[in-house]
Amino acid sequence: MSEELAAGSIEDREIATEQDYVDEVYVQLDASTQNAKALAAEGHQRGKLEHEGGLVERDAMVFQAAKRIAQLDAAHEGLVFGRLDIDPSIDVLPRYIGRIGVRNAERDVLLIDWRAPAAAVFYQATAATPQGVVRRRVLRSLHRTVIGVEDELLDDQAETDLPIIGEGALMAQLSRARDRSMHSIVATIQAEQDQAIRAPGKGVVSISGGPGTGKTVVALHRAAFLLFSDRRRYEGGGVLVVGPSGVFMRYIERVLPSLGETAVALRSLGEVVGGLRATRHDEPAVADIKGATRMSELMRRTSRQHAPGAPTSFRIYWRDDVIVLDPGVLGRLRRQLMSQGRRNRQLPRVARTLLDAMWRQVQGERGRERGREAFDDDMLGHAGFVEFASAWWPPLDAKTVFGWLRDPEFLSRVGEGVVTREEQLLLAKSWAAGDISIEDVPLLDELRYALGDVPQRTDDERDLDETGLLEGGVDLQELTTISEREYAPGGLAWSAPTHRIEDDGYAHVLIDEAQDLTPMQWRMVGRRGRAASWTIVGDPAQSSWPDAPEAATARAEALEGKELDEFHLSTNYRNSAEIYAFAAAYAGRVGLDADLPDAVRRTGEEPAVVGPVDDLEAAVREAVVTTAGRVQGTVGVVVPVARRSEVNAWLASWPELADDAAGARAAVDSSVTPSGEDRVVVLTGLDTKGLEFDGIVVVSPQEIEDESATGRSTLYVVLTRATQLLTTVG
Ligand SMILES: Nc1ncnc2c1ncn2[C@@H]1O[C@H](COP(=O)(O)OP(=O)(O)OP(=O)(O)O)[C@@H](O)[C@H]1O
């Protein structure tokens, strides 16, 4: 028999053995799913009993069952992925590691959850320190079928006849084609990554490292680990994951559900604030103004202004007196109320404050004799007064107040000393459109906090709030505590049922691409994690925010008082060694202080530099079509912002890409709404943050570099996005 055949048959035999075990685990998984479904059915049945207890019980049972079913469903794919063969003097039975823990009917452990302490050795054992592990095996599966195994012998001194098959799971995993989603790496987490994943959930865990070192994927596995290690705390309080863009959130959204975790709020920077959603960036000059700390002063001042259109004086006769609230008095009363706390919180005090000031003007004998109580009763029964009070101090929401800034005269008044005339013009122009940008969201949040929520009326307040100001058409949403946030079965996120400030706090906040947060964005996320533990992921060399020291100060304020635990990742798993050497040389040439990881995978393909070219379209077409023909997975065509529509139009007109035989379709405007199937997409440099593609074609790199103050960092990011092929055309 030839050696190859013999090797083949050993592998087949090993796969068959693993299949038997995997089948047994799936039998148990199916049984658990059936149990959960029965529980849900029973819960619904109880809900039919017509008493309140039945409904509460139903909700609890159905909630738990739905959660369990979602977890079991999510764990289906690649459920069993690891096997450890331990030194026989320690353990004669192999240990299997999986996405979730599974026991058989006798309660024996069939599968260890990858996050359990007993599984840690699967990731931490190395040939230098095998920790009792003789062989580590990774099982590759398609649905329920084992299709391959990859082994590593960790202890070659051990007395063993275990066969060793495959070339190592990591390399096999890194070479596979990329699709539009990030995948979990549970089977191949490396030791330095595992340490960051399992770091205790206190203070701030900071994960740094150069491009492609797994910062994002590690942070997501860390979120899953935290949920597993303290489910009460993190599910109850909520985990917030913040990333740079909607495209990025869609790219990472499947990782946590595939690990059986759905109780996480995934938000792009434009969606962090409940009730707001922005997807558009401002142009760099405007974004730089809106991100700066001084904007918090602008918002504070704005929140304190007299509401435009509100009455500026009030006049009424009572008995023998003319009572006048002139602009000066009203200004003083406004400042007095403001000094007592947030604007909306003062609503119950407004009537009393006005009446106090008015009563001081009652001098006539008839009036003084009737007394204060009669005066109050008369005023509160007087439609003119009630109308005035409601209009003078209306309940305000952040969007309304933000709208005041559209008036250039208002802006120049509150902006004095904070923003220059030129900056005011830029801001006014950006706000004229009416819709909000990603950079506006932290400003609105600032206003929300300065204004405060409209208080819900308690009995005490009802007594005080004689004018009914609190009811002036305000939607008094139910106040719900964080722990009552609803679980959304099948959904991806926890959703806070209200948009109230009380619901903003999370138990854990995870910030990806943290180097790009502006000072104002740090303030916004900081409010969501005052009592939280944090995971912060970033690489300063990839930053697109020009004022690093100001952002560092804002970050320090957001995390004030929290202990810092730092982890550094040193291997680039994304780029081929050839592509990363090219990108690193660029970083060196343009003077970026880059953290340079080692790229471990060689492909023998050097990046191609095409140009200078006369016909840009023809050269780009050639590069895109060639790249799409040579890689199996995704292709990113990265363009300067100013050329996005132009290049989109080119792609749409090339028959090679429309032709299914070429296997590629162009996205019409992928940066906004990429469909899951588009294999070739057009993006700007900033859009590529955090993403990866099998092939990258960079159109006019020099223009990308020149486009903004941080263009060199952006181009460095772009050059580090490809796994297989990189071509620059310009
Ligand atoms: N241990 C691992 N096993 C398999 N694949 C891995 C491993 N670590 C990272 N990867 C893969 O490497 C790629 C890069 O990971 P990721 O995007 O998390 O890196 P990053 O450090 O956040 O990158 P960047 O800062 O450049 O955006 C991903 O495809 C990820 O799945």
Image (tube, rainbow, N blue to C red):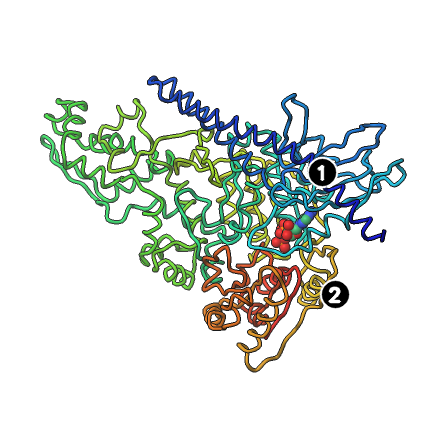
- Badge nearest the viewer, 1 or 2: 1
Residue 81 can be seen in this image: yes
Q: If you read the primary sequence from the N terminus, does the residue marked by circle 1 or circle 2 appear first?
A: 1
- Where disc 1 sits, the SS reads helix
Q: Nearer the viewer, residue 21 or 588?
A: 21
Residue lying at 59% horizontally and 80% vertically, measured from the top left: 613
Residue 110 location, quadrant: top right
The local secondary structure at tag 2 comes to loop
Residue 326: image location, x then y, percent = 21, 42
Report x, y in % for residue 126. Answer: 80, 41
Residue topped by disc 2: 604
Q: Image height check: is 229 above or below 174? A: above
On the question of residue 539 being in view, the answer is no
Residue in the picture at 29% in, 31% down: 349
Identity of the residue furthest to the bottom in this view: 614
Q: Is residue 77 left or right of residue 392?
A: right
Q: Between 367 and 633, which is closer to the camera in this rendering?
A: 633
Label disc, if present, on residue 307 of the rendered structure: none
Question: Which numbered circle lies on residue 18?
Answer: 1
Q: Residue at x 19, y 33 (%)?
A: 361
Q: Sort mark 1 into few (<14), some (14-19) or many (20+) by Cα contacts within 10 Å.
A: some
In the image, residue 130 sits, relative to residue 660, either above or below, namely: above
